[in-house]
Amino acid sequence: MSINPISFLTRTRRPGRLDLTDILSWVWLIGGTLAVLLPVVWAGLSSLKPAAEITRFPPTLLPRTAIEQTVPGFDKPLSLWQVTIDGQQREMAMVRRIGLKAQVVDPANPEKPISVDVKSMTPVQRLTVATENYTDPLIRFDFLTFLKNSVFVTFVATLLTLLVNALAAFALSKYRFRGDKTVFVIIISTLMIPLTVVMVPAYLVIVGVGLVDNLWGVILPTIASPTAVFLLRQYMLTIPDELIEAARVDAASEFCIFWRIVLPLTAPALAVLAIFSILWRWNDFLWPLIVLSSRENFTLQVGLNAFQGEFSVQWHYILAMTFLSLLPVTVVFLFLQKYITTGIAGTGMK
Amino acid sequence: MAELKLSTVNKSYGAVKILHDVELDIRDGEFVVFVGPSGCGKSTLLRIIAGLEEITSGTISIGGRDVNHLSPAERKIAMVFQSYALYPHMSVRKNLAFGLENLKFKRAEIEARITEAARMLALEPYLDRRPKQLSGGQRQRVAIGRAIVREPDIFLFDEPLSNLDAALRVQTRAEITKLHRDIKTTMIYVTHDQVEAMTMADKIVVLRSGRVEQVGAPLELFDRPRNLFVAGFLGSPRMNIIKGKVSGIGEDGIVIDVGNGGRLVTDADPAGIQMGQQVLAGIRPAHFARGQDGLPFIVQYHEGLGTETYVYGSLEGESEQIIIHEAGHFSPSPGERILINSTPERVHLFDPESGLAFGRRQGRL
Amino acid sequence: MATLKGGALLDRAVETVMRVVEAPVNAMERVLGRKRMPWVFLAPNLVLFGLFTFIPIAISVGYAFTGGTALFVSDRPFVGLDNFRTLLACDNYLRPGTCQESLFWTAVWNTLWFVALNVTATLLVALTTALILNKAIFARGFFRAIFFYPVLLSPVVIGLIWKWFLDRNGLLNAFLQMLGVPPETFLLDVGWSRFFVVVVSVWFHMGFYTLILLAGLQAIPKDLYEAASIDAASPRRTLFRITLPLLGPNLLVVLILLMIRSVQIFDEAWVLTNGGGPGTANSFIVQYIYQMAFGSDLRLFGLASAASVLMGLVLLVLTLVQLHLGRRMES
């Protein structure tokens, strides 16, 4: 395929002419891309700004911080500003600010402070990366705990989801027994009852089994999934029955047939399911919100929400942790995006 | 020991009866072939012996013990499936080892058996490959190897050659027969191909619609078919069937009038035969000879294969196709009239209603 | 040599784990017999469904017909249809202020408006994008991936990102100021907050539906378009007379799916609007249920369950329609 970008861009319905629809299409696509990327990138860049700078309006694009300089005669370093004095731009250090006026001194000549209008000042800044926005919450605000909890929930839930649903799919695809159709219908019927409809009594059940405010209480209801059973069953039906018979002739127990023959052969479907399970468990919010009440048990999403509720104006921390939450997903996406998008289009899964 | 005995075995799926009162006695070390057209129940019977299907009624015993409720492995059988059913995610070595590992054999014993089987079947170069890296013939040998390492009492083969091309089929046929000579274990082999049955079997079981039509050695079934079906099934091209009427019963034989003045003499047992009775005479193509007298045969066309010729036509005045077989070259013209005849012991007699063959005259075998 | 040994060790470890898991299940098989094993395999699934779907349904019904604040149904007094009556008691259904449970009806109307707007907007955006991507020759995979990216993010993350974007000192206001428009506190304004809840929801889920519609578009045979162009059909006619009708079943399925999802809106809206604000402008049904049951120790499980039952019925109808359509599509 020719890689001539010009010919690419101008390849249209009527070759040689740029159609109006084509222009609009490009505008849509580019606009959409910006719409998707802008909020995310903006959040990321903002998360690198130090606390003092983050609420500056109008905001700067790149993270910057004020350059400070130690000026003789003053205890603490003073921020540098470009000040217009008598028509001249001079670099001055600010001593204090009162309302619309600021007191500035020449760093070289700190004896005489001058009072200037705030409006005539612009900060002198350097590029910076405020890594403390990331390290502080991890160390001081329990975010490491939240992260740990999320990893635990995601990992265990995914493992159990794969195992439990594969077992059920195996039973429903490779065995004929009385009641097998009924069981299948029962399982599929639970599709019609999303969590939001039963979340209140489900909470009662969790209380009843003593798993309230417990990560296992978050995990257990998410394991049995009718969609997973359905999909795995469809896949297992394509495994030839003769393989299973050969295994029986080879003295394999029923579970051994599942564990050593059918499960390995179902690997592709299990991989897709694993990806979705990881995604859903990592992003779960409502159910963990209901079940968990102690801070040390919060998953990342619940913790993030609680944090922004308590520290509602400390955006530098909030954004840093938000960005941290979406990093793993983004990285995985960059590597697996082709696989994921074709997989979903193929199955049209919920 | 591994004798297999089936008594009044019946199999039904719901309302549909697949096998009717099957009785079978197989001695230890025999090579038995179940043969019959599609849907005759031969595969079902094999799977029942294997323990992969349940009997609806009846008993199976192996080596004298009732195995009705035993799993396939407990029956000490091994099976070679039509599609080979090799575990695709395991290497050849692991495929061979799987069954033994399930039976908790020691590592050393497993390795010894694998080595021996690999040697017997020339599988050494492939032991660490996956099935999809092997050719059809190689996969088949692995499937056989998987059965060999188990050292079963009975080997079961379910149409193992049907996925191979003609040349490979002939070669593998010989290999399986040689295997049987070497390890001398009971083998039960299912096929729809009567050539395989004739060449490989010690004993053939012919099945049709779930019933055993006849059991016996290949040549016995060939020379003395019990009914029309067996007569027509074994032997290629199939036996010619000619309608006729008994016109004479005497010491030399029974005379059949086939119309248009044609006569056949057969040495069937006269007991139970009456004058004027409608009968069917069966003569194999190769058992016809050209002669000075006999039945008038009008040639339609012929196929000359060099070593032999098949001539297609019909008896004068009849429309049913008759095939005759001549050794060597023979090129009759279409429409040519030839006289063909056969010897009495080669004319089989069948009852048109029951299809059963009339017995041979006593004293003759 | 080292890797060989390491590989063999790993094999042995995996093998041991597998044996450990197998042992108890094989013991069960010896006790129960081969025939019963399918039930053993189904057991975990059935137990979990029983615990977290079927028993909750029963309890929900129990809650809906009882009152009080006790957690266990047996401790609650039977009140018959009172909870439903309370919920449905209104002088004027169009004005939540006149209802006994004004919060519930506010939530219902908010949800209805949201469903209508969200479904329309998402469908239009997804359809347009799918149509464009279907024709795109250049970098289709790239754009498809970009638009799908938000689907992978958590609703909390999305709520916070957009909260920041719409902040008084945020990027949107910076743009506006560049254009000479005075900055707004969007999330504190009833109209704007509702607008942006829809925008965020579309932004969040659009990629998913685009994929489904794109698959549907690509299933339309190319020769139909060629025949149309031989028949001198303008692009517009092709779109409305060929493409859209053939996409029809697909569109219908997406529509129902969207409706089912939209009715259950909660996570990202809750985070974005700080709990349904300003006031109750963005308070939706799921939030109502949550607040009645778990919010500030209200523990009004009866009302919450009655509302859950009503919402469940609506969703049930929608799901049945969806299943029916799905079966029709396959035939």
Image (cartoon, helix red, strand yellow):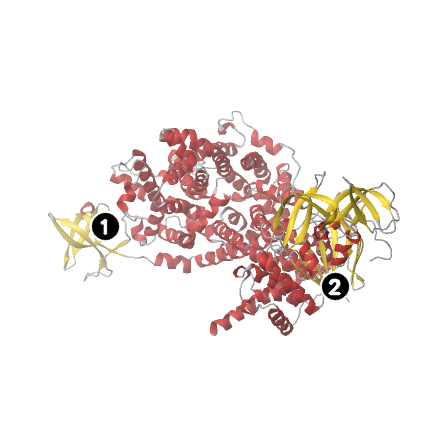
- Please tell me the numbered disc located at residue C238: none
Q: Nearer the viewer, residue B235 or A271?
A: B235
How far across and how far down the image is residue C202, in percent?
41, 39
The residue carrying pointer 2 sits among few (fewer than 14), some (14 to 19) or many (20 or more) residues within 10 Å by Cα, namely: some
- Front-lying residue, B25 or C316: B25
Instruction: Kindly indicate whether the residue at mark 2 contacts the one at mark 1 (C-beta within 8 angstroms).
Output: no
Q: What amino acid is at disc 1?
A: Arg
The mark total stands at 2
Question: Mark 1, chain letter?
Answer: A
The residue where tag 1 is placed is: A97
Q: Position of residue B158 (x, y in %)?
A: 67, 56
User: Quarter of the image containing the N terminus of chain B?
Assistant: bottom right
Which amino acid does the dot numbered 2 rest on? Glu
Which subunit holds the residue at mark 2? B
Compared with B32, C160 (above or below) is: above
Relative placement, left or right, of B39 versus A337 is right
Residue wearing tag 2 = B30
The verdict on a common chain for dots 1 and 2 is no
For numbered disc 2, what is the local secondary structure?
A: loop
Please tell me whether mark 1 or mark 2 is closer to you in this view: 2
